Image (cartoon, rainbow, N blue to C red):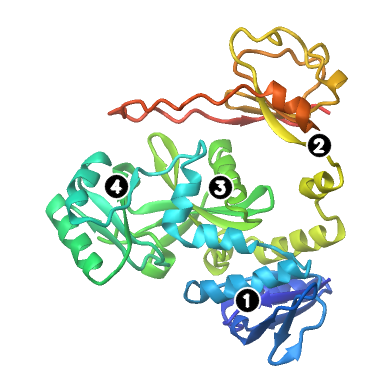
Amino acid sequence: MNLAVLSCSRNCYSTRRIVEAARQRKHSVRVLDTLKFSIDLKQAEPNLYYRSKLLPDYDAILPRIGASITYFGTAVVRQFEQMDVFSANSSAGILNSRDKLRCMQVLSRHKIGIPRTTFVRDKQDVLPAIDRIGGAPVVIKLLEGTQGIGVILAETVKVAEAIIETLHSTRQNVLVQEFIAESRGRDIRAFVIGDRVVAAMRRVAQGQEFRSNVHRGGRTEFVMLDHEYCETAVRCAQIMGLKIAGVDMLESNQGPLVMEVNSSPGLEGIETCTKLDIAGAIIDYIAAQINFPEIDIRQRLAVSSGYGIAEIFIPDGSELIGKTIDESGLSDKDINVLTLYRGTTVVPNPRLKRVLEPGDRLLCFGKLETLKHLIPEKTRKIRRPKLKKLQPQSERKVEPSEH
């Protein structure tokens, strides 16, 4: 494999370890300074130049894009994507995760635990917004802060109001989040590669510091995560569009609450803590993708005119209730059931003898015209009043494939 690591810091621990791991596995690897690229655009021929020379062919890239060069860095990654070079993290995934507000907005559409969060600009909206997330104390965050920089704990509403007003006066955008008291000074960093958590550590703040980041002096300890935390971390990475990610979670009374998804997680802290070869796992994953690439379902659809994917919901009173998938007649209509969602359970490739129940959701592939008639019309979402007490987050269960 011929691998390029996009990094402006070739001597930092993470970059050095990735290069070392690649060479140990007999791969060709080169560190390329992200800022030294030139992007050339021409009809049907996207190209990249590095230090004013046409870039040679690479099998894959591993982006290590710093926050200060997000715009240019993601443009470079996007150009590699146009050239059909595999990227361990997509340009869209990096952009989604880099902006804290954007990250929270994307996650809020899914059944992922997150701290109650608000984003306001008008001074008159600050106090009502703080009240909606439970009042003081609150955590105030700069949208693009890293390593704990720009994260402030405001113990009272007055202090929070003053801090937000000051930051707004300097044209800074800030998030305001509820403070999770039971997780004060500690969080979980789960390292996701592909579809699994390969390592995890608990970060614990020292002294009066409430931020647990290693760069703020936080202590780390090895931790074995249970199913709920592992699944939450993997789903967050997948939702963000990241194959390699560090997912930061709070240990709350309601289960894991996701704070942040990092597209360029550092290796030093977690390798030192866990004594695991995380860099090697990254290289092995990328090599596997090059040798055995995942088939993009969108590519299949592009050559299957009239076919597509849709989710079918089975409401109360449906004629499908009580029937098996085989008896439902879906296969007779040239419709294949890819995944069954039942409550918090996910069943990939369900058996044809699986009996359908009210509330089941079927992810199906088939003729679009046929699928369209099986999808119930959308009903207007009813906005219910906010509950004063958070409901415990149910444990989500993923079953193995039934085929």
Q: From mark 3 to mark 1, how far is it between C-alphas? A: 24 Å
- Number of residue marks: 4
Residue 377, position as x, y percentages in the image: 59, 23
N-terminal of the pair, mark 4 or mark 3, is 4
| Crowd rating for badge 1 (residues with CA inside 10 Å; few <14, some 14–19, many 20+) | many
Q: Secondary structure at mark 1?
A: helix
Q: From mark 1 to mark 4, how far is it between C-alphas? A: 34 Å
N-terminal of the pair, mark 4 or mark 2, is 4
Q: Nearer the viewer, mark 1 or mark 2?
A: 2
Looking at the rendered structure, the kind of residue marked 4 is: Phe
Q: Secondary structure at mark 2?
A: strand
| Crowd rating for badge 4 (residues with CA inside 10 Å; few <14, some 14–19, many 20+) | many
Asked if marks 1 and 4 touch (Cβ < 8 Å), the reply is no
The residue lying toward the viewer, choosing from 246 and 45, is 45
Q: Which residue is mark 2?
A: 307
| Crowd rating for badge 2 (residues with CA inside 10 Å; few <14, some 14–19, many 20+) | some
Give the residue at the far bottom of this rendering: 52
N-terminal of the pair, mark 1 or mark 4, is 1
**Does residue 105 sit above or below 215 in this rendering?**
above
Residue 121, image quadrant? bottom left
**Does residue 313 sit above or below 214 in this rendering?**
above
Q: From mark 4 to mark 2, how far is it between C-alphas? A: 47 Å
Q: Nearer the viewer, mark 4 or mark 3?
A: 3
Is there any visible trace of residue 178 in the rendered image? Answer: yes
Residue 161, position as x, y percentages in the image: 17, 56
Looking at the rendered structure, the kind of residue marked 3 is: Cys
Query: Which mark, residue 15?
Result: 1
The residue lying toward the viewer, choosing from 10 and 25, is 10
